[in-house]
Amino acid sequence: MKNTPFLDKHLALGAKMAEFAGYNMPISYTGINDEHFAVRNSVGVFDVSHMGEFILKGPDALDLIQRVTSNDASKLVAGQAQYSCLPNNNAGIVDDLIVYCLKPNETYLLVVNASNIEKDWNWIAGFNDKGVQMENISDQTCLVAIQGPNACKVMEPLTPADLQKLKYYTFEKNSFAGVENVLISATGYTGAGGIEIYFENKDGNAEKIWDAIFEAGKAANIKACGLGARDTLRLEMGYCLYGNDIDDQTSPLEAGLGWITKLKKEADFPSKAALVAQKATGITKKLVGFEMLERGIPRHHYKIVDSEGNEIGHVTSGTQSPSLGKAIGLGYVNVPHAGLDKEIFISIRDKGIKAKVVKTPFE
């Protein structure tokens, strides 16, 4: 297993560690619910340095991005970021990612999922027939997510950047806690607001920044948070997790990601024609949010059935929502059962437990 530069910090805080995407990662410290509420109500800190980062540079960098991603990166100006995905050749998804525009038409940062770093690199490189300079900076890049309604306020003393004016899906380069050339972005995946900071792992930067963050956040009762709370937070928002809710067998249209699938953009990308056809004929399954109406926790891969016990789909993510006090989940169901308030049943130990389809974010 790989370790992030913050391993000693996690161990000192008593984190429960486990393997995730080949990395030794903190799952929780004081408990998932405790960390979840810290982010929803004040501020929490996640080490997400396991994520992958690629730099694409050169006069044809945008052209390459346009030919491998579903969204339209030509709309980006410097300081803007964009959620997107890498479609495969079978209308599935290689990965979801964020594209950061460092210099329009010339330099971009792509942030990908930890479990897909090598796969994504090879996939993008396979389309690089115009000599775009590609650099995998994953191993030397630290990424810390500082999330919650108080995050920007308590971090402001650490940087000249005006954090509270940083709009969602924008970023800027600035100093942070005395470290230069830090990319500060507002692209969090918790729905609670806050920032993420990318910086190079050198000269003791990791320890310096970690200690400064926790010192600045003392009055706000800042907490270190693990992947367990990250999952409950993103699920309450209805955000997809690669490997659970989206994968190489699910299309972005089925996953409700039509808004990042720009079928009218000029550039061709993998499966564009197939996705155009899928949109015209209509999808047969759809990712929906649901809440349990009876006692039971939905889990990944549980079957979803109708009132007569016929299989109509499967659960992709599920949990007991800390904020809402009820069990919620995401899952694919056949389109006739995908309407709001439709009654469905989650098969738990061979018994159909009643649920209903609801809108996301969950409320």
Image (cartoon, helix red, strand yellow):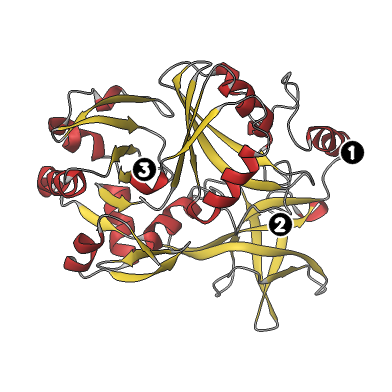
The amino acid type of the residue labelled 1 equals Thr
| Picture residue at 24% right of the left edge, 34% below the top | 152
Q: Which residue is mark 3?
A: 192
The CA distance from mark 3 to mark 1 is 37 Å
The reply to whether the C-beta atoms of the residues labelled 3 and 1 are less than 8 Å apart is: no
- Nearer-N-terminus badge (3/1): 3
Q: Is residue 148 visible?
A: yes
Q: Residue 184 location, x and y as percent?
A: 31, 31
- Nearer-N-terminus badge (3/2): 3
The amino acid type of the residue labelled 3 equals Ala
Q: Is residue 241 visible?
A: no
Q: Residue 270 location, x and y as percent?
A: 75, 36
The CA distance from mark 1 to mark 2 is 18 Å
Q: Which residue is mark 1?
A: 281
Among all residues in the image, which is located at the extreme right? 281
| Picture residue at 58% right of the left edge, 69% below the top | 298
